Amino acid sequence: MANLYVFDANPPDVRAEYGVIPQARMLPSADGYDVAQTLPPDKRATLVFYCANQH
């Protein structure tokens, strides 16, 4: 699919234990990133975010 972006919002310890989806873009945290600089400028792009639910 064109214009598909996958973002990994897991912390480093979860990534180390479970791995990452190949070619996923790593976020520094689930809520600590600069949206304007991190997300693609194409407003029609499909964005997929994933993280472990440890609660």
Image: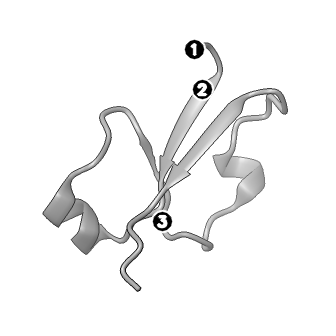
Q: Earlier in the sequence, mark 2 or mark 3?
A: 2
Kindly check if marks 2 and 1 are in contact, taking CB atoms under 8 A apart as contact: yes
Q: Is residue 28 left or right of residue 37?
A: left
User: What secondary structure is marked by label 1?
Assistant: loop
Across and down, in percent, residue 39 comes to 68, 44
Q: Which is more foreground, mark 2 or mark 3? A: 2
Kind of residue sitting beneath label 2: Leu
Residue under label 1, please give it: 1
Q: Badge 3, how many Cα within 10 Å: few under 14, some, many 20+? A: some
The residue depicted at 49 percent of the width and 58 percent of the height is 27
Residue ID for mark 3: 28
Q: Residues within 10 Å of mark 1 (few under 14, many from 20)?
A: few
Name which of mark 1 and mark 3 comes first in the sequence.
Answer: 1
Between label 1 and label 3, give the one nearer the viewer.
1
Mark 2 element type: strand
Q: Nearer the viewer, residue 37 or 25?
A: 25
Q: CA distance from mark 1 to mark 3?
A: 25 Å
Looking at the image, residue 38 lies above or below residue 33: above
| 45 left or right, relative to 32 | right
